[in-house]
Image (spheres, rainbow, N blue to C red):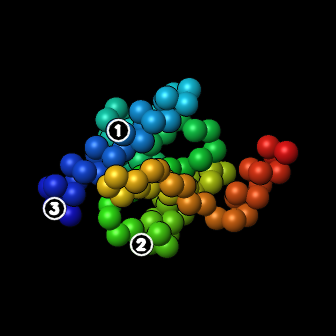
Amino acid sequence: MAINSKKKGAKGELELANKLKSYGYDCRRTAQYAGKTEDSADVIGLKGIHIECKRNERLNVYDAMAQAKRDCSDGNKPTVMWRKNNCEWLVTMRLEDWIELYREWQ
């Protein structure tokens, strides 16, 4: 990964953490505080959600989800939060996880 890609990724993680904070959640980048471990999400603070953060123009969402599932600890829902330049943040989850959350909301 090129240096610029790493910087863009770190910037995206910080941007997402701040966006989630604006909704009232105490979120932060994991690499910013304790270093990254294999099973840690890019951004933490949403209970039960494993966040894989992506900031690129041509995301392969299936590869990103495979990474989230691989790195996700038991009991958490693998989730990809991503955006490209000049676009809004999007969230990708497995349908069964989304249905479970929706049923709890109802």
> Within 10 Å of the Cα at label 3, are there few (<14), some (14-19), or many (20+) other Cα atoms?
few
Above/below status of 62 relative to 99: below
| Residue shown at 51% from the left, 66% from the top | 65
The residue tagged 3 is 2
Of the image marks 1 and 2, the number of the one nearer the N terminus: 1
Q: Secondary structure at mark 1?
A: helix
Quarter placement of the N terminus: bottom left
| Residue shown at 55% from the left, 31% from the top | 23
Q: Residue 3 appears at what percent x and percent y? A: 14, 55
> Decide: marks 1, 3 in contact (CB < 8 A)?
no
> Within 10 Å of the Cα at label 1, are there few (<14), some (14-19), or many (20+) other Cα atoms?
many
The mark lying in front, picked from 2 and 3, is 2
Q: Secondary structure at mark 3?
A: loop
Q: Give the alpha-carbon distance from disc 1 to disc 2, as whole Å.
A: 21 Å
Q: Residue 69 appears at what percent x and percent y? A: 54, 63
> Decide: marks 1, 2 in contact (CB < 8 A)?
no
Task: Say if residue 52 shows up in the picture.
Answer: no
Q: Residue 96 appears at what percent x and percent y? A: 73, 64
Q: Label 2 amino acid?
A: Asn
Residue 57 appears left or right of 22: left
| Residue shown at 32% from the left, 64% from the top | 57
> Decide: marks 2, 3 in contact (CB < 8 A)?
no
The residue tagged 2 is 60
- Mark carried by residue 14: 1
Viewer-nearest residue: 81 or 66:
81
Q: Label 3 amino acid?
A: Ala
Q: Quadrant of residue 5?
A: bottom left
